[in-house]
Image: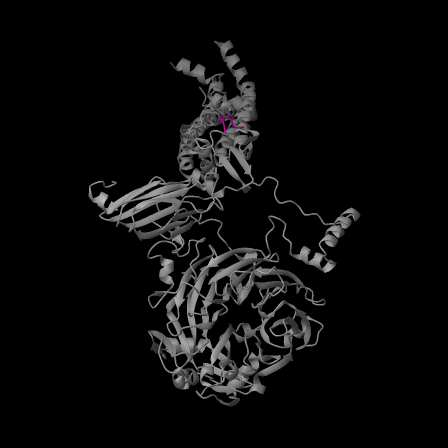
Amino acid sequence: MKMPIGRNRLPVSLLLATAAGVLLSCVVPDAVAQQEGRRRRGGEQEVKPLNLTPDQVAQLTKVANERKLNVDDLLAAAKTFMPSGRHDEYVLFSSGGQSGQVFAIGVPSMRLLRSISVFTPESWQGYGFAGEHDPVIESLKINGKVVAWGDTHHPALSETKGDYDGEFLFIGDKANARVAVIDLRDWETKQIVKNPLTISDHGAAFVTPNTDYIIEGGQYATVLGYGYAPPSEYKDSYRGMVTMWKFDRMKGRIDESQSFALELPPYWQDLADAGKNASDGFFFINSFNVEMATGGVEKGNPPFEAGASKRDMDYLHIVDWKKAEAAFKAGKFEKINGFPVIKIETSIAEGILYFAPEPKSPHGVDVTPNGKYMVVAGKLDPHVTVYSIDRIKKAIAEKMYSGTDEYGVPILNFDAVKEAQVELGLGPLHTQFDDKGYAYTSLFLDSAVARWTLGGEYDALNDDQPWKLVQKTPVQYNIGHLCAAEGDTVSPDGKYLISMSKWSVDRFLPTGPLLPQNFQLLDIAQPGTTMPVIYDSPIGVGEPHYCQMIKADKLKTWKVYPEVGWNPHTQRLDANAPKKGSEGVVRDGNKVTVNMTAVRSHFSPEHVEINEGDEVTWRITAIETAQDATHGFCIGGYNVNLSLEPGEYVEFRFTADRAGTYPFYCTEFCSALHLEMMGYLHIKPKASAQAGNSPD
Amino acid sequence: MSRIISTLIGPRVPLEELRTHRWHYLTPTFIFMLARVLLLVSIFFPYWHMELEAPQYPDGLFLTAYVNHLTGDVREIDGLNHYIGMRPLGEAAAFERAASVWMIIAMFMLVEGAAFIHSKWATLLAIPAVTFPAGFYADLHYWMRTFGLNLDPEAPLSASVKPFVPTVIGEGGIGQFKTYAEWGQGYWLAVACSVLVVVGFYFHRRAYRPLSLRAKGAT
């Protein structure tokens, strides 16, 4: 008998097949599930180029005439209207003023996307309503007292190499000298730090080009560290300050132990801006009240408003923060209220601090994208004054001083550091930039936005003469800050400008004596034309100050929490988060732990039976994974309301100090059976609980 | 005994004959080999997809079945199904999913065995692989039907959604959802395997039947 072909191959391949089988059945499910690609049926509808027929033109004309719209109005509408489902190109992160919040607004539609609660408890987001010892409320305490509001002024997006990176947002609370960190993955506040030196601030938050530090400049001088001195000792005892908060990007938190402050003379430091590119390593702060007026109209003294405006020049503060950091690391500081402070003498000796004269009680110093020029807007002077970093460095190196101030800080010669002055109009406040060599400055008294040309290397970018006013667009009314698309970064986009108009007067229907602010959208994309106002957006929830506009595609926002059981306070999966199947009530003496899950459309458990006086720890996991399948959870009378976003885990605690039968329910309309998503918290009165009717 | 075995495995090819007509005999072997590989590879590919569309899910919901597991928006679909009283999808075809990889390996080896059996009995070994796609379809249909027809009468939406037979392939609908179901690449690989095995048997018969007849004539 001949050998059949391949007979001795058989066992080998059998073996191989079996081995492969074992491997496959172990590995396949996970491996393949990872690669799962979603197929889209249909997909995005293609937008065909528009070509209006005479009939359509007639329709459009009819509507325009009926609504009394002119061609500019139609164009404005076309530039801002967003069809349903279309997303905005930019997101504007705006301070919320006294509301203590941040607003996120889509541009160009100007639709409010949402608010982010920061310094003020807010019930929709469940921010500060998680029972007793809520970490949010704890973080709002100052010297043991809950300060449940903030005056948010200046948001600062985190930057990498001077450009927004879309990871974090910082914002200062002027009223209470606090700085908050917001994580832009879930748009929630993660940390609030209180400045231990000062009661209030103004120049927060501004970041260095790689977000190494968050700058918090002070404003109203006090005795640092919550000290006391009468106004008669103002010059000797009161001090200004600027704090450098070290940001730990990996942790997403400010590292207070690596942060420090600089003591400053008791002028009123105002806004700050960090140098970049050519001026990297410096930051700049404008100031007013170098007169050191102490007011007192009630005693016949000139009021602050007059006393602080007497002199024609104040001081632009020039801070070499890399030298300051070195001095801090070398231990050249004193501690005030436990916080390291580099004294003025040290700053002078180490070459950290210089002044340059600036006219007149200015409001804002803004660094051009290339970092070469610092623009100071005069407020009480009709000019913007432009300083150059090259001139500043030269003046420092050659000691071109015009003297020192009362505290010994060298004052650089104004003519030596001044690059240009451009007359713009009345009340110049803040400046932003585009990509075509223009700067934009808000004119408060003129109620206008001025477009003017930069010089130097920017001269080549347009046909206009350098350092010249090009045009002005009226805005309605009393513009404060303004914001161009990425207009304070190293690479502005040259699109869209927001006029943050303080008064709206007649722009909207009257809303009682308290009127909304007016965010106006200006189209600045075309250099040759005017800068038309193309949208008015009422902001009726606070008086915002500054805002920043980031390209929406830079944000890496989570659609739902990455895993079910996620704790947003720690930004990781929480081992305490109840899982489906492990719900229940656990009692240990009078300490009760409730483990609950929430899913459309029920809580589990639905009845929670405890005794009066129990100390309750209540844990809820929203075991949802679908986008927007958010639940709420409230217990009436116990001041509890939570926002349970898909995957989120929340723990809250309270003492069951009032007996009764409390319905709890879902506060976010979640499903067709939302109303049925409820349960009862039974708190048995002490007497009946002691009579042996213990619920468990 | 050895006589029964030699009847079962059929005649061996004489070495001289094999040398001169190598491809004549190797063709079925290679076709079977290709079929086996396709079947094995199919484990890695989805067998069946369903997309569910509803207004509040602009991106749709997806369900993808592999021979041994289910992926996609299973959690969300289970969540929705509980309103109409349908059991969780994870409870369907549990045995089939656990056994499928081993079943495919068994079919792999049976087809391999068929290449070495030169009698008509080889067809017996190939039956599972040839009928596998049909079996998969029948099983899928069985489970969909069982789940669809056995809704919990106590479910919240039992008044508006009555027991139904979901559409296994093509367009269907339930409540506000439109469903689209189609076979995945894995299923088509299994079908290709089935077809290739049948084709392989044409060449198998062409190669070995003359040998069997000759052997029969010789006895």
> Residue B54: image x %, image y %?
55, 38
Q: Which residues are magenta?
A: B161-167
**Is A558 colored magenta in this rendering?**
no
What residue do we see at 49% from left, 61% from top? Answer: A102
Q: Is residue A485 visible?
A: no
> Residue B211: image x %, image y %?
52, 16
Identify the residue at the far bottom of this view. A403
Above or below for A149 versus A289 = above
> Residue A348: image x %, image y %?
43, 84
Q: Is residue A550 visible?
A: yes
Above or below for A592 versus A328 = above
Above or below for A170 versus B111 = below
Q: Nearer the viewer, residue B37 or B176?
A: B176
> Residue A679: image x %, image y %?
37, 41
Say how the picture is coloured. Answer: one colour
Identify the residue at the far left of this view. A691
What secondary structure is the stretch in magenta mostly built from?
A: loop
